[in-house]
Image (cartoon, grey):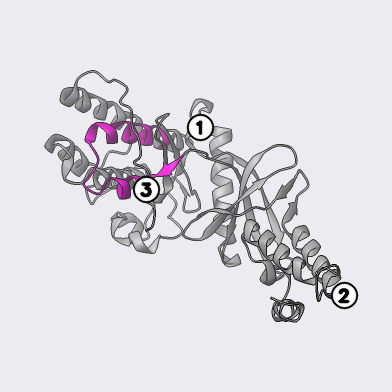
Amino acid sequence: MNAAEALAEIDAARGPAELFGADAAEAERTYRRLARVLHPDAPGGDAAGFVRLGDLWRAYRGARTITTSRRAYRLGPPVARGDLAVLYAAPADDGTDAVLKMPRDPADSDLLEREAAALRRLAERGDPRYLPYVPRLVESFRHRDAATGAERRVNALNRLDGFVSLADVRTAYPAGLDARDAAWMWRRLLVALGFAHRAGVVHGAVLPEHVMIHPAEHGVVLVDWCYSALDGDRVPALVARYADRYPPEVTGKRPAVPATDVHLATLCMTDLMGDRAPAELARFARGCTLPSPAARPGDAWALLGELDELLERLYGPRRFRPFTMPPAKENP
């Protein structure tokens, strides 16, 4: 690349965001690549072009710092991509290791507001012993994109390190998971639901991508509360690719109740085990997914007790069972 080609690349971009892109590491490489060519000391360099590049870089870096009334976040690369939002690494100047959750479409900001309201309610009304089962809301704020002018609701959440989703687990174990491994995930998921339901919140989207587990520590965190509803309200939206999983009260736009989450959570676990679920456990699951919400269990805490009794009959006294994820396969 020569200086003329570098300037042409700059001219073709409609601003700093388009020139450098969304990924922080790639942006740094782009800047260094262009700077090497345009630097006045480089053969055929262009001093004016170098100054212009520097201005664009400073504008880009400034846009990558999001400042609120409480703290400043340094926006890093995406760490996860959900159905309606992207999560970016965003360490804050006060030492908070956060991620910023931003909707792709500003029109979905109301769902981010719904998530923030649910997490606040859980923190204020829920039993504090179970707060680790849900994300911690650092803060929620409106942010205007400097490049496009679009305004979005942004939720700053604590970062989850070492966690994988149940979707990842299912992919890693295509033949199905041993029910003894699924058992601790199921138990902790019911704890998360019991905690939420006692605070009056129905999650509304207990799906494989939204249940995060920590394999080594047997931790569970139920994420993505954008689809949540207060007990008795309707679930505001569906995740289209899982439309066939939702119980009739959701697809029929009727009130969501704790039994709604029980239905969705049970399907997560039966999908995880596949054909490896013992017959008794399969019958237990069928009772949790009956068409009528009134016929399903609606008390996650009571259901946990029933599950424990069944597991003890099947496997004896509860004991810690190490769980590992197989190493990811490298692309050839």
Residue 193 on the magenta segment:
no
Residue 299: x, y in percent? 33, 34
User: Callout 2, which amino acid?
Assistant: Ala
Label located before the other in sequence (3 or 2)? 2
Which region of the structure is painted magenta? 163-192
Residue 110: x, y in percent? 57, 59
Residue 82: x, y in percent? 48, 57
User: Callout 3, which amino acid?
Assistant: Asp
Left or right relative to 326: residue 83: right
The correct choice, above or below, for 270 with respect to 84 in the image is: above
Does the rendering let one see residue 154? yes
Q: Report the mark closest to the observer, 3 or 1.
A: 3
Determine crowd level at label 1: few under 14, some 14-19, many 20+ residues with C-alpha closer than 10 A. Answer: few
The residue wearing badge 3 is: 168
User: Callout 1, which amino acid?
Assistant: Pro
Label located before the other in sequence (3 or 1)? 1
Q: CA distance from mark 3 to mark 2?
A: 50 Å
The picture quadrant where one finds residue 120 is top right
The residue wearing badge 2 is: 48
Give SS at disc 3: helix
The label number, if any, that marks residue 83 in the structure image: none
Label located before the other in sequence (2 or 1)? 2
Left or right relative to 169: residue 199: right
